[in-house]
Image (cartoon, rainbow, N blue to C red):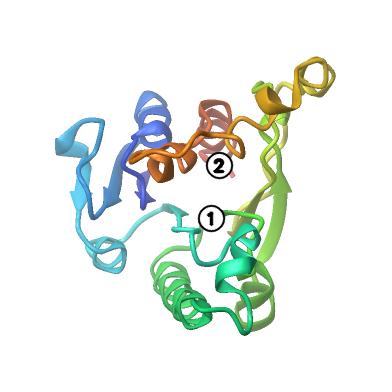
Amino acid sequence: MDVLIGCEYSATVLNEFLAAGHNAYSNDIIDTEGNPSRHLKMDIIDAIKSKKWDLIIIHIPCTAMGVCGNGTYGRGKTKHQERLDAIEWTLSVWDAAIENCGKVAMENPVSVLFPHLKKRRKAKTQYIQPYMFGHTEQKKTGLALHGLPNLVGTDNVFDEMMLLPKAERERVFYMSPGPNRGKERARFYPGIAKAMAEQWSIS
């Protein structure tokens, strides 16, 4: 399969699809931590339109759309217009993806995006947790799906996770401030990436 992993610099999902034998490429406007020859450093819409893809997975930026930012980006707040602009841009990315490809997934944390995708683009939404895929952490994550089945959990470690202190099982939420905090919070979970490569390769 020709696979595009949009808005990914870490190569986490890319590497799982490469390991599964697919012709996969990541994409972002910044450099990759993976193989540069497998990275399209460009705007996501340009990457989508660069060829006909068999599968597109997009980790869309969540800063303005995540519900955790309602105090800054919510209605009546100082950056609300940035949220509206982010929603419109994201919808344009989704449209470009589903016009190009019959199998599309867009990932975002709990976000104001999903109701818009469901209402205006009729996308199916699934919510997953890292602990369903072997990670002793909780971070509710949404997947907007087009032409793809829901991911099935591969290794549920919920009981083990609940024995940990809250700061450990909610590591991302409690991450210390710093110059790389945004990038580290956005880093994807390898267990979920592996499930994508295994389950969506044969869907």
Q: Position of residue 25 (x, y in %)?
A: 28, 43
Task: Between residue 191 and residue 180, name the one nearer to us.
Answer: 180
Mark earlier in primary sequence (1, 2): 1
Rendering quarter of residue 153? top right
Q: Amino acid at mark 2?
A: Trp
Q: Going by the picture, which residue comes out furthest to the left?
A: 37
- Left or right side of 21 for 84: right
Answer whether labels 1 and 2 touch (C-beta < 8 Å): yes
The residue labelled by disc 1 is: 105
Q: Amino acid at mark 1?
A: Ala
Task: Between residue 148 and residue 192, name the one nearer to us.
Answer: 192
Few, some or many residues within 10 Å of mark 2 (<14, 14–19, 20+): some
The residue labelled by disc 2 is: 200
Q: Nearer the viewer, mark 1 or mark 2?
A: 1
- Left or right side of 199 for 125: right
Q: Can I make out residue 133 in this image?
A: no
Task: Between residue 24 and residue 9, name the one nearer to us.
Answer: 9
Q: Is residue 176 above or below residue 72?
A: above
Q: Is residue 159 above or below residue 75?
A: above
Q: How far apart, in angstroms, are the residues tagged by discs 1 and 2? A: 10 Å
